[in-house]
Every structure is written in C-alpha cells, then in structure tokens.
Amino acid sequence: MARINSNYRKLTAGYLFPEIERRVERFQRENPAAKIHRLGIGNTTEPLTPTLIKGLKDGVERLARAETYSGYGDEQGQKELRTALARYYAAMGADLEPDEFFVSDGAKPDAGNIQSIFSSDSMVAFQDPAYPVYVDSNVIAGRSGPFDPDRGNYGRFIYMPCHEGNGFIPDPPEKKVDLIYLCSPNNPTGAVADHRQLQRFVDYARRHRAVIIFDAAYAEFIADPQLPRTIFEIEGARECAIEINSFSKFAGFTGVRLGWTVLPRTLVLEDSEPGELRRCWLRRQTTFFNGASNIAQRGGLAVLSPTGLEECRELIGYYMENSRIIKEGLQESGLTVYGGENAPYLWVKTPGGLSSWEFFDRLLKETSVVGTPGSGFGPSGEGYFRLSAFGHRAAIEMAVESIITRASFAAR
Ligand SMILES: *Cc1c(COP(=O)(O)O)cnc(C)c1O
C-alpha cells in the first residue's frame, strides 16, 4: 500500500500567492473599473539585451550544423561557461576553479535540492523572513518537526529574526546548528550583509563545522562598492560555504532558466573527506538532472562577456531607478521603507500597527496597488509588506502616484 510523503502536509507557504490572487480577483469583481497596479511579484519584465539575444541565437544556430551540434553536455555545465564564471568571480576577488561550478537550470531548484546532500537529521537555521524555498525544501525532507500555528514556526527549525534593531541582518545562532541559509541581498527585506556580518557567520560555521548555503541571486543589484557580492570574498568561506546564484534577475533569464552553484573542493564536513561533498552534489545532479539547456548556456556566456555585463548592468540600473521612484514616493506618503538601495525589493513597515494582510487589503482597496504581505515570508515578516521594483517604468509611476494621491495614510 503506497503512502504519501506526509511532510507535504506540514507545508504552510504556497498559500501566499494563491491567497493574494483570490483577494485581487474579488476586488476586481467588486470594482470592475479599477486598474490594478502590481508591485508584488519578483519577476523580470524588460526584454533581453542585444548581446544576450545574439548569444542565444548562436546557441540555436550551433544546433543546426553537424560540426557544432551538441546533445547532452558536460555534466557540470559547458567548460567555457564555467571558466567564464570563475573569471567573473576572480574580478570580485574570489579564487575559484572552473570545476567548483555546477551550472543548473536556476537558483530555485539548486536552493531546494542542495539540502539532499546533508544528513536528514541536520539542524537547520534560517533568516526570518526568507525566500520560502529554504524552509519548504527542508520541511519536505523531514527536518522541520511539527508546525506551531500560534508561533507560526516549525519546532525543529532555528529562526534568525531580522528586524529594525539588527538592520534586518541577523546574528549567527546561539546554539550549534549544522546548516545555515543566508540570502544577501535579501528577498524579501532588501537588506545586504556587510563584510563584518558575513565574517561572523563564516567564523561561526568554521567553529561548529557548519555549512552556510548562501543565495546571491541579487548580487548584481549591489550598488555600494563596499558591500560583498559573494560569500567567497570572505576569509575562510572556502571551508564552509556553498553559493547559489542565477542569471534570472541578473540578466532577465527568469524564463530562459540558467543558474549555478559553487561548491569548493576545500569544503569538508565533520565526517567527510576533502572533495567528497562536491562529489555528492555531482552525483545528485547527474542522477536527478541532465544539465542546463545548451542554448541557455550560450546565452549565459554572452551575459558574462564585457558587452553583456555592461548591458545587464544598465538593465539593472533601470530596475533600481524604479526602486528609487517607489522608495521616494512611499517616503513622501509618510511610510517607513527599508531596502531598495542595493536590492530590487522594498520592505515597508505597515502604518498604525496594521498586520501585513490588513495593510494588503487597505492598500488594494484605497489605491488598487498589489504588494506582498511580509508575514508570508516567515513570522518576523508580520507587520511588513514587500514591494518589488520589477516592472515597466510607466506602470511603476502610476502605482506610486496612486499611493501618493489616494492612500488614506499618506501625509498630504
Ligand atoms: C528569484 C530568486 C531566485 C532565482 O531563482 P531562479 O530559479 O534562478 O529563477 C533565487 N533566490 C531568490 C532569493 C530569488 O528571489
């Protein structure tokens, strides 16, 4: 008799976006003339740049000729792309070998799958709030313990609260844990950890033989040259960190699908030999995954070319100008807003002590603007609201205008 993996029944997230849609649909039904402004979704909106299109076309053309045709590729990803990635990291001051890179179809699958190479009884710590994949993948793997509906958390997980008091960057856990998920620049808070803060995590991980899983999907959005763009800028990280990254937000590849994971040979666990963990990940990927599309990989190579990088950074500049417009508009309305300077997310404190969902309803009703309730990202997200800077400029301006002129909380 087959039985279901009952850990799926413990999942709570996943309810967030369907619930948003349900409320938006009801609002639209009751207010058919209202024009909805969406500032909620972390999805890119602007077209790929010319160099990237050329790279992708080149990938297609190669498939048209016998001399350049390729089927299954190198298991870790095309050598040329991994070499270009190693060079890209070298420019940030991080020393990594091409065979420490694993090209994938995106950071989300890697962030979800990476837990499978660690012992199933590992104690896991998470930034709270966080991108839901880290928690959910560990729930499915059976590490969570029961969900406590009163506290909004899982009994066996360690939460590292992010709040105004710590600038939304937590301290390392007090207890000894085995795995730590960090995301900087952070989705949803837009906060970025500095060198000193990351060094504390690396020191903690080395002291306790813990592993940091570092999601750097928004690294290219960092404008401040003082802030670290990769955990491998931090001394000692090669012994204790795995980095997950993606071309999705960096280059607009959300639909193309291409990412990578860095797993250094020098990363050793309590009970593993040098290189063994890296081999486990290779084994995991070759067993469950057959490599990223060779067309997408030619596109990735184009991203990392000098003109590709220049164009992508210009595109990021466009989104960050959106971010500036939203932040200024909200501040003008009297709201307290964090993030949005080195990340495409703004973390808004709800006014008047409203809960995240109360603010969601109020903003929708008064201004037709849709955002994302912070409580959907973890218990410490309660009382906050996430807005995203992805969107066409005109749509962003209309949304901000609607908040400034129509929100009852706006100071006029
Ligand atoms: C969008 C996002 C990703 C990207 O995932 P892909 O699968 O590469 O599209 C990864 N991590 C975070 C925190 C994100 O917000």
Image (cartoon, rainbow, N blue to C red):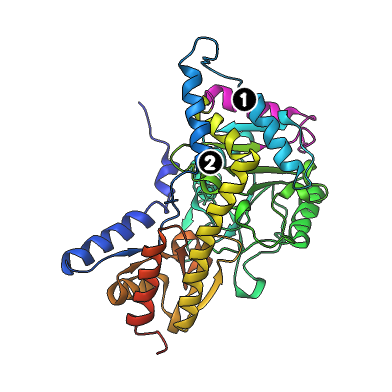
Other residues around mark 1 within 10 Å, as few (<14) / some (14–19) / many (≥20)? many
Q: Is residue 3 magenta?
A: no
Give the quarter of the figure containing the N terminus.
top left
Any part of residue 277 in sight: no
Q: Amino acid at mark 1?
A: Gln
Nearer the N terminus, badge 1 or badge 2? Answer: 1
Q: Is residue 55 left or right of residue 355?
A: right
The quadrant where residue 198 appears:
bottom right
Residue 121 marker:
none
Q: Position of residue 217 (x, y in %)?
A: 58, 48
Is 88 or 290 nearer to us in this picture?
88
Q: Which residue is mark 1?
A: 78
Q: Is residue 108 left or right of residue 222?
A: left
165 w.r.t. 370: above or below: below
Name the residue located 26 percent from the left edge and 59 percent from the top edge.
22
Name the residue located 51 percent from the left edge and 68 percent from the top edge.
347
Q: Amino acid at mark 2?
A: Gly
Any part of residue 29 in sight: yes
Q: Is residue 96 left or right of residue 372?
A: right
Q: Is residue 288 magenta?
A: yes
Q: Position of residue 240 (x, y in %)?
A: 76, 44
Name the residue located 64 percent from the left edge and 30 percent from the top edge.
81
Is 2 or 239 nearer to us in this picture?
239
Q: Secondary structure at mark 2?
A: helix
Q: Which residue is mark 2?
A: 112
Is 23 or 364 nearer to us in this picture?
364
Q: CA distance from mark 1 to mark 2?
A: 23 Å
Q: Position of residue 265 (x, y in %)?
A: 77, 32
